Amino acid sequence: MSKNTERNLAKDEAGENKHTVYTAGGIFTQHDLATNVFIKDSVWRQSDGKFELVLPQSKELRELDRPDIAAYIRNVDLAQVVKSDLFLARFDGLELDAGTIIEFMLAKFLGKPKVILRCDSRRLGGESLDEPYNLMVKN
């Protein structure tokens, strides 16, 4: 864990470390949205509140009528990646979400601990079964 991550850890009432986890993945279908909430709730409960997932879909609705909405969403999401302690990427679908890839690469460049979650058994690319990801995010 990087020194910045160690410094940014919040403490709960018992003085134990709490971690924020930026969660990247699809947010464009009802299934994606529901799955994200399910994962957030499950991680929170199973970690006794030590891991709090930040979901990009949780932006306040009043912000969505901004004239600069595309830049606003990008900037807020990337700032949340920077502020988070850990990074969780949902790599589902036949093609990975481009925004998820950008957020994943930023987390990688920042040295954030990363977890890839894949619930989709289909393969994304490559000719063999040992190549489940796009070449640009492999290794």
Image: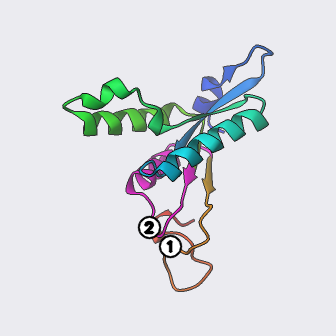
Residue type, numbered disc 1:
Leu
Vertical comparison of 23 with 101: above or below? above
Q: Which x, y percent locates residue 130?
A: 62, 78
Q: Secondary structure at mark 1?
A: loop
**Residue range of the region highlighted in magenta in the rendering:** 89-113
Residue 111 seen in the current view = no
Residues at marks 2 and 1 touching, judged by CB atoms closer than 8 Å? yes
Q: Look at 62% across and 71% down and name the residue there.
A: 121
Q: Specify the quadrant of the image occupied by residue 47.
A: top right
Give the position of the N terminus as an image quadrant: top right
Is 40 one of the magenta-colored residues? no
Farthest residue to the top: give it: 13
Residue at numbered disc 2: 95
Q: Which residue is mark 1?
A: 124
Q: Is residue 79 above or below residue 103?
A: above
Distance CA(mark 2)–CA(mark 1): 6 Å
In front: 43, or 37?
37
Residue 101, how many percent across, how many down?
A: 44, 55
